[in-house]
Amino acid sequence: MDLTQKSYKYTPVRFWNLIPAKFVLEHVKRIFRGVRDSNPGGWCFTGRPPSWYIRKRVEVPFPSDKVFAVYMNPHMRVYECRAEYVSDDDDMCPINWRDRYGRLVWKDISLADSVEGSAEFRAEPWYNRYGDCIVFQMKDEAVVADRIDEILTIYRSAIDDKPIGYQIKSVHALIRRIGLEGLACESVSTDDELLTVSISGPLLAAYEEGRGTLSRRAGYTTAIEKSGSPAVQIPKAELAPAYGA
């Protein structure tokens, strides 16, 4: 007999509190690994559901000074779910969590908490070192990818389907094949050495790598037109890939 059936048979309120348990698992705020010394492994998932049951058919808002904890065994089967008093140092952690669990393995944070400074749109190409690609958008709008080939993708506006930018992929593969000289207009030496890159450089190099079909020609022409005439300055240090070239 599983937890659902036994809870329903012996403690109906515990059964109905599987509903807030489901909410916590879908909106988890903290995950802890290592629950019992006698049973290696095990997990604790915590969060704060909007409501819970305190008596049969009595649903009330979940208290702000408590956290709801869902416990799983090493085989990922729920064996307990309950409210707990919160820790003084984190209101999404159960009290004494540092002594009770092996370690905190995941903590939910908002996107706003993970970045610094103010958000502002810049119509400038930038190098994404995790994807080894150059990204450029003329407008701050959601985009739909129009893949031209393995190097170029045109960004089309999700609002009116007009081209508003592009992505140039495999930048370091291009550098290895044609060298920085093939991409650079000139080198500018300052306190932080800059490599002045003409975006048309990698676009032309990528176009020459593939077949000259009409669709590719149209895609690359669009990208070059959207680049504009001024050269783009990219700090040389920013061209380092995240995981090796």
Image (cartoon, helix red, strand yellow):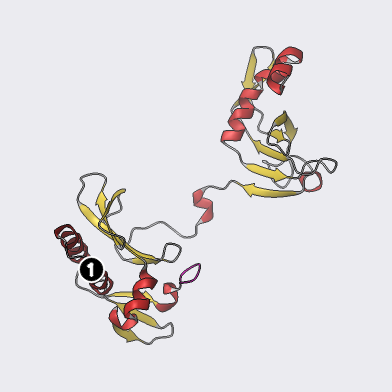
Q: Position of residue 217 (x, y in %)?
A: 16, 63
Pointer 1 residue: 207
Nearer the observer, 184 or 179: 179
Quadrant in which residue 139 is drawn: bottom left
Quadrant in which residue 158 is drawn: top left
Vertically, is 36 above or below 183?
above
In this picture, residue 142 sits left or right of residue 95: left
Considering the image in quadrants, where does the C terminus appear?
Answer: bottom left
In this picture, residue 75 sits left or right of residue 175: right
Nearer the observer, 151 or 65: 151
Quadrant in which residue 6 is drawn: top right
Residue at position x 33%, y 85% in the image: 187
Sort mark 1 into few (<14), some (14-19) or many (20+) by Cα contacts within 10 Å: some
Q: Position of residue 43 (x, y in %)?
A: 71, 40
Vertically, is 64 above or below 141?
above
Considering the image in quadrants, where does the N terminus appear?
Answer: top right
Residue at position x 66%, y 37% in the image: 46
**Which amino acid lies under the numbered mark 1 shown in the image of this protein?**
Tyr
Q: Which region shows up in magenta?
A: 241-245
Residue at position x 39%, y 86% in the image: 190
Q: Position of residue 11 (x, y in %)?
A: 75, 16
Asked whether 112 falls inside the magenta stretch, the response is no
Q: Position of residue 203 (x, y in %)?
A: 25, 69
> Could one spot residue 137 in this view of the protein?
no
